[in-house]
Each structure stands twice: as structure tokens, then as C-alpha cells.
Image (cartoon, grey):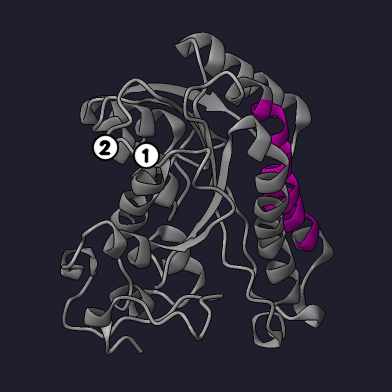
Amino acid sequence: MTTSSLEGKTLFITGASRGIGLAIALRAARDGANIAIAAKTTTRIAQLPGTIYSAAEEIEMAGGKALPLIVDVRSEESVRDGLKQAATHFGSLDIVVNNASSISLTDSQNTDMRRFDLMHQTNARGTFLVSKYAAPYLERAENPHILMIAPPLDMKEKWFARHTAYSMAKFGMSMIVLGLAGEFRPKGIGVNALWPRTPIATAAVRNLLGGEAVIRGSRKAEIVADAAHVILCKPASLFTGQFVIDDTILAESGVTDFRHYRVDPSQELKIDFFVPEDNAGPEDLAGIQ
């Protein structure tokens, strides 16, 4: 049965110290959820606000319970220890959100191999690693979900030509969704992917993807958080193996006005990477460029 609240649920969210991960955490916190903040940032970094401790304060203020955990998703030991701490501290583990990601929009000749390795270790390997070790805990949950912040599997040349290494790593997360949805279906664990139709106004977008011009044509992280909430409240045994675009699932759940998600309502919205051409979105969003 679909529910409307994550009250009492325990979420393990990677990369939750800022951006989309923190937004998802805060939305769940407003329901009274428990949040394990699994990230590396313990001290403020220039141009990247937010640490696991500041995130914990925000989560507590929003009405949730927080557990800041220093977790490097590239490390098997760190992931196993973090999951164990979360399950022990809160008494259960219900939901995993694989949000941690690394990006470098460079072509083959300008991709440093250390950056290549970082993206694959964080995006694909990290997602697989967290999901693998979370599964035994999730099997005991009432409505267990694994959610990847990953794109639909729209395998087109244009998504790879300009940044092959990043696309490989990001689509690697999507392929894990496809595989684990089938593997975990008999266990009742829902495994799904969520992707934004537009760029999301985060520090990473501002610093790496074009600065304020892109930010003005973006949406706020709250749209992804609200879409994630819809997915995580669905019955995991029935809703699995889905590749979801944020505004589409919100429209299906009854949302008709998306204007409050825009950073600058006077600007036309831009389209994010990896959104399939045949996915037009809700009708009232005509005019997205």
C-alpha cells in the first residue's frame, strides 16, 4: 500500500552533506525520519558549503533524527562500517539513496586517468558497493527501497561523445538499477532511478557546469526531493526497476504547478543531460529550452 509519510523510517543517504542528497534528507526529516548522513566532508570547503555536521543540524531542525557518518563510498570497509553504525544506532535500515557522484565533463583527450578512476569508483562502484552491503539489512525492512540518482538508460551517441568517461560512470549507476531490480525483486526490495529534467541549482552546477547563467535556468533541489519522497512512499514490491524523471512522477501524483521549483521564473528552463528526447514532460512545461 502506498503511504504518504516516511515517519520512523531510517534512510542511509550518500553525499547528503549538501545539494540533492541533503534536500532528500530534509524532505524525509519533515516526516520524522531518521537520516544517516554518509559523506566525507567534515570541514567546510571553499565554494562547497555543507558538512555532515551542518547537515545533521538542519535535519534535526526539520524534525528528523540525524547520524553524521564519515563514509567514503570507494572504501569497502568504510561502507560496511557506516551501514552497520546506521542500522545499530536507529535499530533498522529501510531506505538507501545512492546520491554520491563525481563529475568531469571532459573528452577522452582531456580526461586525466585519476579523474576517470574517481568517477568510476564513486559513481558505479560506490553505488554497487553500498547497495550490495545494504541488502541484508533492507531484507528485514517493511517497505525497503534503494534509489539511485541516475539517468534513464537512453544509450545514444550524443550522451557519450563529449564526455565518455563521465557518461560511462553515470550510466553504470543506471545499469546497477536494472540488474538489482531483477535480483532483489523476490526479496521485495524496490530498486529505482530518479533523474531531474533540468539542471538543479547546486554548488556543483554553479562551479562546474556554467555558473550563474545555468543556475538561472535551473530548478531547486526540492523538486528532486519531492519526487524521491513519492517513490520512497510507494510499495517496494510493486514499484521497482523504474527510471523516473522528477516532474513526470510529481505530475502523476497530482502536482500541477511547478513554478515554485524554478530558481528564476523569468528564465526559460534548460534540459539536463541524459533526458530522452521522447520524454516531453508535463504539458504545462512547454517552453523548456
Are the two marked residues, 2 and 1, in contact with CB atoms closer than 8 angstroms?
A: yes
Q: Position of residue 124 (x, y in %)?
A: 72, 52
**Badge 1, how many Cα within 10 Å: few under 14, some, many 20+?**
some
Q: Position of residue 227 (x, y in %)?
A: 35, 53
| Type of the residue with mark 1 | Cys
Q: Nearer the viewer, residue 199 or 245?
A: 245
| Type of the residue with mark 2 | Ser
Image quarter hosting the C terminus = bottom left
Q: Is any part of residue 110 visible from this angle?
A: yes
Q: Position of residue 108 (x, y in %)?
A: 80, 79
Give the number of the disc on residue 233: 1
**Residue at 44% across / 51% down in the picture?**
48
Q: How many marks?
A: 2
Element under label 1?
A: loop
**Badge 2, how many Cα within 10 Å: few under 14, some, many 20+?**
few
**Residue at 23% across / 84% down in the picture?**
267
**Residue at 77% across / 72% down in the picture?**
111
Which region of the structure is painted magenta? 116-135
Q: Nearer the viewer, residue 234 or 30?
A: 234
116 vs 236, left or right, is: right
Dot 2 or dot 1, earlier in sequence: 2
Q: Is any part of residue 220 visible from this angle?
A: no
**Residue at 68% across / 22% down in the picture?**
136
Predominant secondary structure, magenta span? helix
Element under label 2?
A: loop
Q: Quadrant of residue 266?
A: bottom left
Q: CA distance from mark 2 to mark 1?
A: 6 Å
Q: Quadrant of residue 217?
A: bottom left
Give the number of the disc on residue 4: 2
Magenta run includes residue 9: no
